[in-house]
Every structure is written in structure tokens, then in C-alpha cells.
């Protein structure tokens, strides 16, 4: 028995990702796991942290081990990048605050207030 589209009940081929009649998504197309795509997602996960979680979770939902490994690496790189940016930002703002306080104390001491 041929598979049928759950929406319009037209016979579809087992390899079809979409119903040719109504456009219903029959099953997810496997994600690309080429080396270029893999490294692109790794770089994006580190440089654009929020997107790394989205890419990572998409790959974690796949059945094959390679895709899940790519997903875990994307999630880990995103977390590491977020921690690095947070620590750097805190140090930057502490430095700015210290400089502003020094200048304010210098202005207050020189003006005779």
C-alpha cells in the first residue's frame, strides 16, 4: 500500500518530503552535515550566541549521531561565548565606572566643594 498524504489523502512516494498536491510537510528533510556547513555553524555559534542555540537544538533533534554531535558542539560554543562576553562586559563596565569615579573625585577636590 502506498503512503498517503494525511491532509488531502493523495498517494505520495515514500521519498517525498512534501505532498505534491497540497504542500503538506510529510517528514523533515535531514539537515546538511558537510564539513563546511559544520564549521560555519560552529563559527556562527561562537560569534552570534543566541543563534547557536537554535542551530544546536535543530541538530539535536536529528536521529543520527553525527548531527547530534554537531548540535552539542553548537550549544557548548554558544554557552562558552555567552560566558566570555558576560565576563568581558562586566570588566569593561567596572573599568569605566572606576575611571568616571576618579574623574569625579578629581573635579570635586580641585573645585573646593
Image (cartoon, helix red, strand yellow):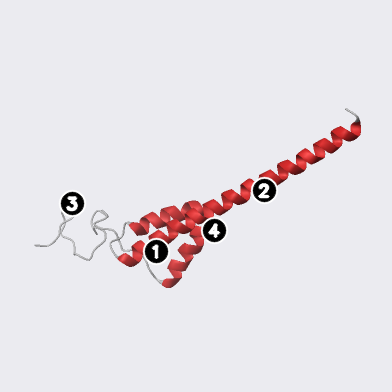
Residue in the picture at 39% in, 63% down: 70
Tell whether 99 sits left or right of 21. Answer: right
Front label number (4 vs 2): 2
Q: Residues within 10 Å of mark 3 (few under 14, many from 20)?
A: few
Nearer to the camera, 88 or 6: 88
Among all residues in the image, which is located at the extreme top? Answer: 113
Tell me the quarter of the image containing the N terminus: bottom left
- Classify 59 as above or below 35: above
Q: Which mark is residue 70?
A: 1
Q: CA distance from mark 4 to mark 2?
A: 19 Å
Q: Determine the secondary structure under disc 2.
A: helix
Q: Earlier in the sequence, mark 4 or mark 2?
A: 4
Q: CA distance from mark 1 to mark 4?
A: 16 Å
* Residue receiving disc 3: 6
Dot in front, 1 or 3: 1
Bin the neighbour count of mark 4 within 10 Å (Cα to Cα): few under 14, some 14-19, many 20 and up. some
Amino acid at each position: 500500500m502506498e503512503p498517503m498524504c494525511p491532509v488531502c489523502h493523495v498517494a505520495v512516494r515514500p521519498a517525498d518530503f512534501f505532498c505534491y498536491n497540497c504542500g503538506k510537510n510529510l517528514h523533515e528533510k535531514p539537515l546538511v552535515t558537510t564539513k563546511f556547513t559544520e564549521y560555519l555553524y560552529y563559527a556562527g555559534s561562537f560569534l552570534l550566541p543566541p543563534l547557536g542555540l537554535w542551530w544546536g537544538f535543530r541538530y539535536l533533534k536529528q536521529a543520527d549521531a553525527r548531527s547530534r554531535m554537531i548540535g552539542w558542539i553548537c550549544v557548548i560554543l554558544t554557552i562558552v561565548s555567552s560566558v566570555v562576553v558576560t565576563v568581558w562586559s562586566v570588566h569593561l563596565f567596572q573599568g569605566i565606572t572606576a575611571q568616571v569615579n576618579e574623574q569625579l573625585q578629581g573635579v570635586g577636590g580641585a573645585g573646593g566643594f
